Amino acid sequence: MKRLICCLLLISTLSYGDDGYRLWLKYDLIKDVAKREEYARSFQFIAVSNQSPILMNAAQELQLGLQGLLGKSVPIITDLGKRKGGVYLNEHKDFSNHINYKDDGYAMSNSDNIYILANKGVGVLYGTFALLRYIQTGRSLTSLPLINIPKVQYRLLNHWDNTNGTIERGYAGESLWKWYELPATVDPRYRDYARANASLGINGTVVNNVNASARFLTAEYLEKVAALANVFRPYGIRIYLSVYFPAPKVIGGLKTADPLDPEVRKWWADKTKEIYKLIPDFGGFLVKANSEGEPGPQDYGRTHADGANMLADALAPYDGIVMWRAFVYKADPKADRFKAAHEEFTPLDGKFDKKVIVQVKNGPIDFQPREPFSPLFGNMPKTPLSMEFQITQEYTGFATHWVYEAPIFKECLDTDTYVHGKGSPSGGATVASVVDGSLHNYAMTAIAGVANTGSDRNWTGNPMAQANWYAYGRLAWDHTLSSEAIANEWVKMTLTSEPKAVKTITNLMLKSREIYVDYNTPIGLSRPWSGVHFAPEPWQEKSPRPDWTAIYYHRADSIGLGFDRTATGSNALAQYRPEVQQKWNNPETCPLPYLLWFHHVPWTKKLSSGRTLWDELCTRFYTGADSVGWMQQQWAQVKPAVDPAIFADVTGRLATQHKEAIWWRDSWVLYLQTYSKQPIPAPFPKPERTLDDVKRLSEIYKLR
């Protein structure tokens, strides 16, 4: 009751301006009186089959939501007698014939009562949030789904948070986790974080950075992690840890971290046992090893499989897994970073323990605004592959640029791999079918998203970035959902239900990614390195390693632009199936979005658009930057329908985005023009600043 009162007080204060804290769980009174009364008739009581923590959380969330949405206090009862006009939240293992126990699924129906049935309490919780989503988005309760089962088993967020409170690639303040206060003081915000994730069906959280500190495996920090696990558990969320591979040396006092050394293996077994004593439902380990300077099994002449299997052995007595990241590449000036993961991991297919999932980034390079799918997907039929998406906007504008990421996720998931000839226009062998296990019959399936949350009151810095957290969670549960449907849901639940405004904002969201790509990296340009991963520095050529320069990727010269990955170049295309190679191998037919990923194209080459490469680039850079002005105009139109505080926040960020889009445009155009020697085509004006001007601006930016 105390919690309910606090939440209602928060709702009342938000009438003075929405600070974004409630995310998509905004249970504001439905303005349509007839619709409100229609819903109210179905909610005379909430009945629970037991009073377990998870089931009671479901009942209390429904009670809170109905109080706000309908303005009606609905009692929670434990009497499951014959009543009508209520909601029955029923956990019962007998439903296992209809719902896969491991899949957290639920059944929902509406007759004399609304029934949410599952064989696990967490399934009932997910069904409860789904019911609230139906009400928030104004859908009819007569069309409740019969059965809803997640397509992926492990649905996780990866937090890149550090012991000192910083977040690697974080743009929304400091870490959510107040390590210096834990375990004695548990911030109430942790529970709201768990609620938000449970509402999407996310069931796992890796709380620390993949560039891990061994300190997280000390007794001091394991107690802190256990305190978080206690908060997450009643919401069906298991906690995981990123681990530092040489921990046996750093904190264990051993002389080696060799995964085949008996003492090392015993150390990990003992440490795992210690963890499970504190956290009985501990989820397992995430590992970044032999990547970007991080130590790993290769330091001892061992393979990734040797390292992963050692940890799997330590987890053997428990219900935990190993997620071993495939983000690996070496500083070889003659190599193509694009090929590295495939080269290192495909020879190990079938050699990993049954508790190991190999976690693969969606693209072969590094979370670019647009990348072809990683060739690893589909090429490891004997090893479960987990998808790793990036929700935080490392390469998509930090917290100032509005980029709705669902189209990025969908573009990858829906792409056909053509594995074993099963590919078809309908997507018979899509990346999604690899990830969800249906193509290769994986025993375990997983998907991970690098989180975009932080200590900012609105969680994600840019209020519009909340949609990316939301979209990731919805797609992790059901990858068949469309980007448009998810955007429409989120707008109605978070910003406004006014039809014209919903349509305008949804349209803005759906176009935002392409607009960003046009002024940032059009036609397959790639630029995964600059000092801050954001400032435009296509001229950047000095770094400790070649693949940490910009020129390594775009290969601009007097002839043309782009990275030749055909047989005449690095031959990275050979890592894909013949049908995929056929699509991308010929520069005459290669789709424009991937052209410069695979081909070095002459500046004067006429493209399928009818323009030369140089003219097409200029057109994209200029129209992309101009389109941010269009975004500003569209956003201005929804002012009457959106909370004033959120409207003002986004208005300011769009102004910054427009300014920075022009900065990106000018940097690329002025730099590439030094190679193309071509004039800027009409009707686009020459930039008002010089190349030296934008170079100085980038240097100043890096001083932030």
Image (tube, rainbow, N blue to C red):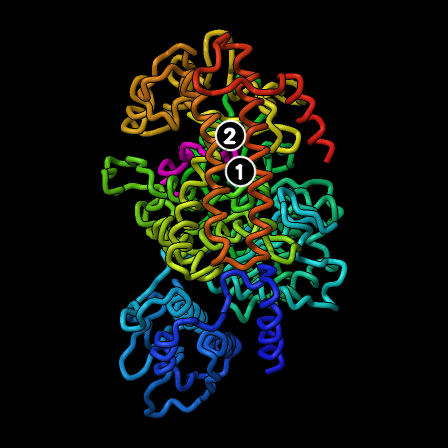
Quick check: 433 above or below 176?
above
In the image, is 487 to the left or to the right of 13? left
Residue 324 in the image: state x and y as whole percent.
52, 44
Question: Residue 371, position in %: x, y?
Answer: 44, 32
Q: Are marks 2 and 1 in contact (CB under 8 Å)?
A: yes
What is the span of residues highlighted in magenta in the rendered image? 364-383
Overall secondary structure of the magenta section: loop
Nearer the observer, 615 or 685: 685
User: The N terminus appears in which quarter of the rendering?
Assistant: bottom right
Q: Around disc 1, counting alpha carbons within 10 Å, would you say few (fewer than 14), some (14 to 19), or many (20 or more)? A: many
Residue 400 in the image: x percent, y percent?
59, 42
Identify the residue at horizontal 46%, vertical 28% (top origin).
Answer: 343
Question: As shown in the figure, which amino acid type bears the numbered disc 1?
Answer: Thr
Whether residue 313 is visible to the viewer of this picture, yes or no, is no
Q: Residue 365 colored magenta?
A: yes
Residue that appears at 66% across and 52% down: 267
Q: For the residue marked with disc 2, what is the amino acid? A: Asn
Q: Secondary structure at mark 1?
A: loop
Q: Residue 512, image x and y in percent? A: 45, 41
Left or right: residue 69 versus residue 160 is left
Q: Which mark is residue 396?
A: 1
Front residue of 335/411: it is: 411
Query: In the picture shown, does residue 648 fall above or below 538?
Result: below
Tell which of 100 and 672 is nearer to you.
672
Q: Residue at x 49, y 37 (%)?
A: 628
Residue 171 covered by magenta stretch: no
Q: Please tell me in which quadrant of the rendered image residue 570 appears.
A: top left
The numbered mark at residue 172 is none
Query: How many numbered marks does the figure carry?
Result: 2
Residue labelled with disc 2 = 520
Q: Is residue 396 above or below residue 175?
A: above
**Label 2, label 1: how many angstroms apart (C-alpha)?**
9 Å
